[in-house]
């Protein structure tokens, strides 16, 4: 069996960047599942984000305790 943890956040107009909260939530999931890495998907719905081709990319991030996260920005 293979386990994976994924958190999805939407960044809406007028809201703060949800990345820190997403990383914190994902950290909790990873701890409960006994995993060292996960995926955070961030959909940026703000007008300033630009078109989907320009804003879509993969980054790396770390949770508050240092777990490795693949961050998909779209």
Image (cartoon, helix red, strand yellow):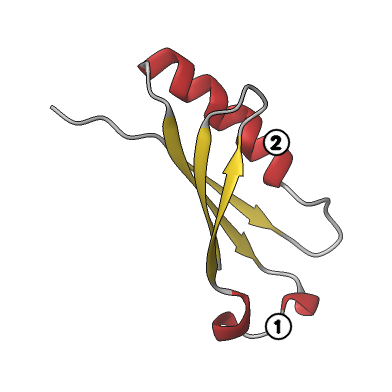
- Place residue 42 in its image quadrant: bottom right
Q: Residue at (63%, 22%) from the top-left corner?
A: 65
Left or right of 15 in this view: 50: left
Q: Residue furthest left?
A: 1
Element class at badge 1: loop
Residue 21, numbered circle: 2
Q: Residue at (72%, 47%) from the top-left corner?
A: 18
Residue 50, numbered circle: 1
x and y percentages locating residue 46 in the rendered image: 75, 70
x and y percentages locating residue 31 in the rendered image: 47, 16
Mark 2 surroundings: few (<14), some (14-19) or many (≥20) residues within 10 A: few
Q: Residue furthest right?
A: 14
x and y percentages locating residue 5 in the rendered image: 39, 34
Q: Residue at (86%, 60%) from the top-left corner?
A: 14
Q: Is residue 6 above or below residue 70?
A: above
Going from the N terminus, do you reach mark 2 or mark 1 first? 2
Q: Are marks 2 and 1 in contact (CB under 8 Å)?
A: no
Question: Closer to the camera, 54 or 11?
Answer: 54
Quadrant location of the C terminus?
bottom right
Gap in angstroms between the C-alphas marked 2 and 1? 23 Å
Element class at badge 2: helix
Question: Closer to the camera, 37 or 28?
Answer: 37
x and y percentages locating residue 52 in the rendered image: 57, 81
Quadrant location of the N terminus?
top left
How many marks the image carries: the answer is 2
Q: Residue at (43%, 14%) from the top-left corner?
A: 32
- Place residue 55 in its image quadrant: bottom right
Q: Is residue 74 above or below residue 60?
A: below
Mark 1 surroundings: few (<14), some (14-19) or many (≥20) residues within 10 A: few
Residue 4, numbered circle: none
């Amino acid at each position: 069996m293979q386990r994976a943890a994924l958190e999805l956040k939407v960044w809406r107009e007028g809201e703060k960047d949800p990345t820190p909260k997403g990383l914190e939530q994902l950290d909790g999931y990873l701890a409960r599942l006994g995993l060292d890495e996960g995926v955070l998907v961030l959909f940026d719905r703000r007008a300033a984000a630009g078109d989907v081709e320009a804003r879509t990319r993969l980054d790396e991030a770390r949770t508050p305790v240092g777990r490795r996260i693949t961050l998909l920005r779209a």
